[in-house]
Amino acid sequence: MPVYPEGVFQPGYSYRVKEVIFQYDAAGKNPLLVSLDGKGSEKRYGLSDTVTWSLYSYNELNRPVTLTNIVQEVTDADESTISMNMSIRQLNYLDNKIYVRICEKQPNETWKVLDVDKYYDTVNGSTKINKMAFEPSKSYLLKFRNLEKNKTYRLQFYALVDRDYDNQVDIVKNGIPMGANDTEASHKIYKNLDQYYGDKNRTTPPANNLEELYKYYYKTTTASAVPVDLGGSSNTNAQQVMLDWSREITTFKKGQLGTIGNHYQSDVDSTGTELTLHFADASGLGKVASCQYYIKYVPNLDDTANEGADVTGIIMADAGTGLITNAASGNVELVIRNGQLQMKNPGTYYIQLQLMTSENRPFEKPDTITMIVD
């Protein structure tokens, strides 16, 4: 059944259905309650399980938009691109439409929305990202082009949402999406809900105020038009209905071919001689032919049983499978196997890597990884 603002059903409460059975007489009139037992007995009724309708609140661990497999590339024409997978969670969107823009960080720490077509690839080979309305509960592959080198970008997402079904658009407050309501009377989502709820037949849903909201927030003439301008001084209202924004992504420097990504986890096998390093958001690792590693072990100060040690080695890429397991981009693993490793010993391990290309040119030297074993 459709749920409208200010109605009987509201998020944040628990509900259950009470089942009763009526039987009409032979003429199809005078319904009577049919019972399995006498009056006052619980067997007269059936009750469903209780269902709690949770009220969504924005938080870092459960964001409205999720980006995964973020990959940078430098084309043969020296063009910098960023691609990723995007999924959008289901909320009470007014029209089930979400709009996406890429933004460039400015020297004064503000974000410039890039509305121009040249920055946007197409989705499924048809419509450019900035000309498309995205839907919740779906996944999309996005790609952004013609980005400047060594610049910081982020994605911003815009949507008209009423997460708490109170007939008011949720807006950004104190840097938190959906942190407050637009209480302007002319911006109500439905202007005349009283008439709808006063109609006992309720055959027609209430008329919404979508066109007026599009004109105010998106500067369009109709609610069916995809917004053209979502940034700059000409449209500051759109910043109020940002649904979410991504983390910052800095493009490669001039001459940089790729990256192993961001280290987020280290695992050691039961023997202590095999170390697996996990990285996120890797790019361009198909160009890597070898990895030199240096691991320095420093025992705890009160450890008299173990001595410090240095272990070095090189990993060569296997034909057909490459150096890195899983893939050449996205979330990847680097496995170091060396019989001299004793990584079960308590203490601190410092791990340095140097990735090299097939031409024996430096590909990347990531930051030192520190690993503490208790």
Image: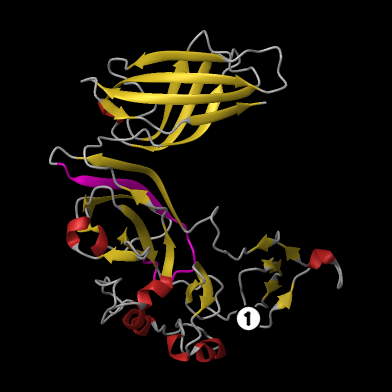
Q: Which residues are magenta?
A: 78-98
Q: Is residue 364 above or below residue 194?
A: above
Q: Is residue 48 above or below residue 190?
A: above
Label 1 CA crowd tier, 10 Å (few <14, some 14–19, many 20+): few
Left or right, 115 with respect to 52, comes to left
Name the residue at the front extreme.
301
Name the residue at the left extreme.
77
Q: Secondary structure at mark 1?
A: loop
* The magenta stretch spans residue 91: yes
In the image shown, does 253 or 327 lie closer to the viewer? 253
* Percent of width and height locating residue 301: 69, 23
> Residue at the spot x=37%, y=62% of the render?
156
On the question of residue 249 being in view, the answer is yes
On the question of residue 3 being in view, the answer is no
Type of residue at label 1? Ala
> Residue at the spot x=47%, y=74% of the render?
171
Left or right, 153 with respect to 309, comes to left
> Residue at the spot x=32%, y=36% of the render?
283
Query: Number of numbered discs present?
Result: 1
* Percent of width and height locating residue 332: 41, 31
Where is mark 1, residue-wise?
Answer: 27
Q: Quadrant of the C terminus?
A: top right
> Residue at the spot x=33%, y=48% of the render?
250
Left or right, 221 with respect to 95, comes to left
In the image shown, does 243 or 95 lie closer to the viewer? 243
Name the residue at the top extreme.
339
